[in-house]
Image (tube, rainbow, N blue to C red):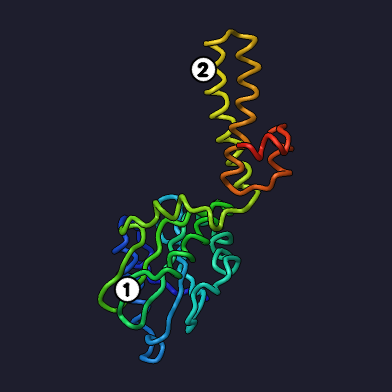
Amino acid sequence: MEVRLSKNQKVIVNHSKDIYLIMRQILRRENKIGQGQEHFWMVGLNQANKILYIELIALGSSNMANIKPREAFRMAIYKLAVRAIMVHNHPSGDVTPSENDQDLTDHFIQVGKFLKVEVVDHLVIGDEDYRSLADLGLFEKLQESKRWVLPYLLEKRARKEGREEGIQLGEKQGKRIGRKEGLEEGSKAKAVEIAKAMKREGIGMETIARTSGLSNEEIEKL
């Protein structure tokens, strides 16, 4: 459900507090019963960081992890948002982000990458206080997480890392043992580094062999 916003609420977001002050107003519009329930909103921003919309995605859920990404990002796609901010309240007043809050953020960051809608923050709010996962420095860790990365993207990333490492190693070896020998050694080294990178990501043996050109026996020895 899209939240009706006043002109004063369609602001340019420069800091997490800008979002918090608006979301606290929205939460306070609820009756006392409603304020005691957990709400989850998505805030869509345009290229200039101006608020395009605020949508209530879930109400009264005790488990935010059950929120479906397709429901959360539907409005972002419709409104052509380029960035999104997740917001939910803790009725208890303790605004410390939980493990589930961080895992949901991790999931939404990866979905946002796929949909070209960058998730830039997640606020946990109360009536008098809030916490921003971005301000707490948690987004850097979540950006590096691979828990929710699609398998084909992991394979693509592993191939890229392996190619870069193999080319660098091949160039070094080529200079040392001569052009022809170096190209041969470099090609082999590149295949080995690709296989190592894919193996670290937990990609299957068959896919590694097909991508790198190495045999199963060679891969097992890495």
Q: Which residue is mark 2?
A: 172
Along the polypeptide, which appears first: circle 1 or circle 2?
Answer: 1
Q: Position of residue 162 (x, y in %)?
A: 58, 33
Circle 2 SS class:
helix
Q: Position of residue 2 (x, y in %)?
A: 50, 73
Q: Nearer the viewer, residue 43 or 181?
A: 181
Residue at horizontal 36 percent and vertical 61 percent from the top: 133
Circle 1 SS class:
loop
Q: Residue furthest bottom?
A: 33
- Tell me: residue 131, above or below residue 212: below
Image mark for residue 95: 1
Q: CA distance from mark 1 to mark 2?
A: 52 Å
Identity, as a three-letter code, of the amino acid under mark 1: Val
- Tell me: residue 87, above or below residue 142: below
Q: Nearer the viewer, residue 149 or 111?
A: 149
Residue at horizontal 31 percent and vertical 58 percent from the top: 135
Which label sits in the foreground, 1 or 2? 2
Pointer 1: residues within 10 angstroms few (<14), some, or many (20+)?
many
Left or right: where 42 falls relative to 10? right
Image mark for residue 180: none
Identity, as a three-letter code, of the amino acid under mark 2: Lys
Q: Position of residue 205 (x, y in %)?
A: 70, 44
Q: Position of residue 212 (x, y in %)?
A: 68, 33
